[in-house]
Image (tube, rainbow, N blue to C red):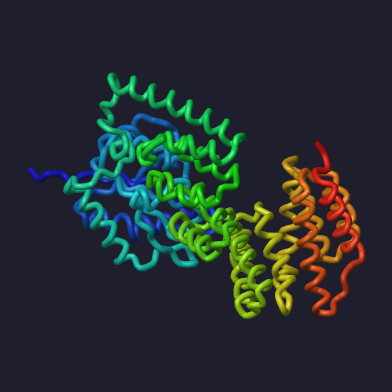
Amino acid sequence: MTQPEPLCLILMPFDKKKDATGRVIDFDAVYHRLIAPAVLAAGLQPIRSDEERTGGMLEPLMYERLLHCEYAVADLTTANAGVYYQLGVRHALKPGSTVLLYAAGSAQLPLDVQQLAAIPYRVSPQGLPVHEPKFRTVLTDRLNEALQGAVVDSPPYQLVRDFPNAEGMKQAAFRERHHFAAEMKRRLTEARLNGLDAVRRVDESLGDLGQADCGVVVELFFAYRAVEALTSMIDLVPRMPAAVAATVLIQQQLALALNRDGRGEEAEQVLRDLIARRGPSSECYGMLGRVLKSRWKNALEQGATAEAKELLVKAIAAYLKGFESDWRETYPGVNAVTLMELKEPADPRRREILPVVHYAVEQRIRSGAADYWDYATLLELAALACDEAKGVDALGRSLARVRESWEAETTAGELRLVREARQRRGADCPGWADVAEAELLKAAARGTARP
């Protein structure tokens, strides 16, 4: 009797779905043209999970498939909650035999796909898979490796010693480590109040950070930030466990520290590498725009006109990509339109983007989550649009919400840049915007405006 082909469970969306960037992907085409042929070429029988079609019910068949299918392929592209739940169950049940893939260019995924050795595939602007033979071969090869049993791909089996038989005598050691980590975090909280030397003493007491509790290492990193020890922050990253150092949080904060330390080119590279590894996000592109904007200002101060011009274009592009990644995030949007105004000649796209940013800010304010920066953004947008009525209203609301002097000073600086750019072009500058700039500087001079 012929031995039946091993089953390969396919965890992925059905039909056409949008990823987090708004791009529509035809997942049925991905399945039929890329995944299923690759699975068959590996000598496996594909069986597609249908939980999405049944409303995500937690039925016995789902768990039976996750347990008994010898192999599995999971598409992480849309960050579908059902797929991630099933992947977690699968990783708890099987040390190997689970292959991950995702559509390249999707917005930032919640997991580090490189750490999980996920396979990227490409789709066309129409949402169809492209270069199928190439990606089918890669997927088939990965499944063949799984067939040989050579790869442990489950994080619990990789990272937890003796998993899943790690109970009993291991629990006492776990509790001891937990109490030690809690004590270290308490000491770091105190050290933040006592300055750099106190933080360094805690650092020295931890010994090899590669073996330290990950949460404590992160707290140490932010303790150095709290005492303005940029060099110590930067030097700490190579000493961290590799998995911690590679996280989005640490890499973003590393980039900001490098930028503040005058190492803008390194900061830019860190953020570009992070975007390439984890996918585009509004936050990462906003930070990249911030780094490039700082470098643009430095180039202007040094009289490097050609370099400044190039950096301004790059900063606009980064902020624009950040806004396009998530239209609800107004920080990259307002920075994009402001820098477009400063460009010589002014970028005409600002007229199209400005009302979209304004709408996004208004929606945030209506949600009840507004703070100083939302009203300051409305003020900047009013200045760019030469809208006196909205500008006067936004100024009053901004001044009423100033918490720290640097907030008002930052907004005044943005209004000044716009005013100076318009003066260079011989364009009219609204008088009320000059008044707004002066009032913000007064608020900054007074210090914190409210308790």
Q: Is residue 75 above or below residue 432?
A: above
Closer-to-camera residue (346/220): 220
- Corner quadrant of residue 346: bottom right
Q: Is residue 345 above or below residue 314?
A: below
Closer-to-camera residue (393/8): 393
Image x and y of residue 217, in percent: 45, 39
- The quarter in which the N terminus is drawn is top left
Q: Is residue 299 above or below residue 279?
A: below
Residue for point 39% across, 30% down: 59
- In the picture, measured across the screen, residue 438 lies left or right of residue 170, that is right
Q: How many marks?
A: 0
- Tell me if residue 180 can be seen: yes
- In the picture, measured across the screen, residue 270 lies left or right of residue 288, that is left
Closer-to-camera residue (16/319): 319
Closer-to-camera residue (176/62): 176
Image x and y of residue 389, in percent: 91, 58
Residue for point 35% across, 56% down: 119
- In the picture, measured across the screen, residue 143 lies left or right of residue 121, that is left
Image x and y of residue 216, in percent: 46, 35
- Tell me if residue 325 can be seen: no
Residue for point 21% across, 54% down: 42
Task: Please identify the residue farthest to the left as the structure is shown.
Answer: 1
Image x and y of residue 355, in percent: 75, 61
- The quarter in which the C terminus is drawn is top right
